[in-house]
Image (spheres, rainbow, N blue to C red):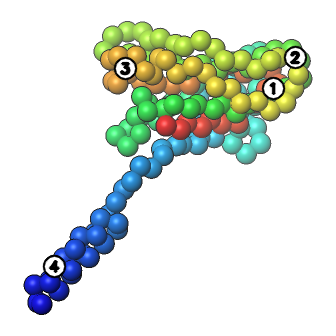
Amino acid sequence: MLSRGIAIFVTAACATATFVHADGAHAKWARHNAHDCTTDDAYSGWGNTIDNNGPYNIDVSCALDDDYLYTKQEIETLNVHVHDGPGYASTYARVCVTYYDVLGGSCDNWAATPGNSSGNYTLQPPLGALQIVGAAGDFGYLRVLLPSGSELKGYYTHD
């Protein structure tokens, strides 16, 4: 009887430990506001946006998450949230990498807003540059070209 009680106790303890310490499959995601990005010529907007109130396009660069918990190769969705201002210029976004071991880098194709009306848009640029063989050591980033009157609100990544 005592051995049966011990067996039940050990089974219950193992089951409890399994449920308490189980990590499971958790989705990884990250949201960044535009102030996590850099540019040489931008005007601060409302809160944490980057507004281009100047007369020329500005080039914005934003680092993509890449650490031992969430590597850039795991990114399957990239949403870039922008507001196109009045006029006919499009906002563009694309993913690039800078090589760590040699000079240079590579970029994917641009994703663009329609450019014929103002409003809020979500761009989803291709992610191929992050997935190429040997890219694990490269530095991934998002590049956004903001025309005059437009705004970068932020970006979101998800595995």
* Mark nearer the viewer, 3 or 1: 3
Position in image of residue 79 (x %, y %): 63, 32
Q: CA–CA distance between discs 4 and 1?
A: 66 Å
Which residue does the image show at 34% across and 40% down from the upper left?
Answer: 68
Q: CA–CA distance between discs 4 and 2?
A: 72 Å
Q: Earlier in the sequence, mark 4 or mark 1?
A: 4
> Residue tagged by mark 2?
116
Q: Secondary structure at mark 2?
A: loop
Which residue does the image show at 63% across and 40% down from the upper left?
Answer: 33
Residue nearer the viewer, 151 or 119: 119
Badge 4 vs badge 3, beta-carbon distance below 8 Å: no
> Residue tagged by mark 3?
135
Q: Earlier in the sequence, mark 4 or mark 2?
A: 4
* Circle number at residue 7: 4
Horizontal side, residue 118 vs residue 123: left or right: right
Which residue does the image show at 84% across and 30% down from the upper left?
Answer: 119
Q: CA–CA distance between discs 2 and 3?
A: 36 Å
Query: Dividing the picture into quarters, in which one does residue 83 lie?
Result: top right
Q: Earlier in the sequence, mark 3 or mark 1?
A: 1
Position in image of residue 88 (x %, y %): 86, 14
Residue lying farthest left?
Answer: 3
Q: Secondary structure at mark 4?
A: helix
> Residue tagged by mark 1?
84
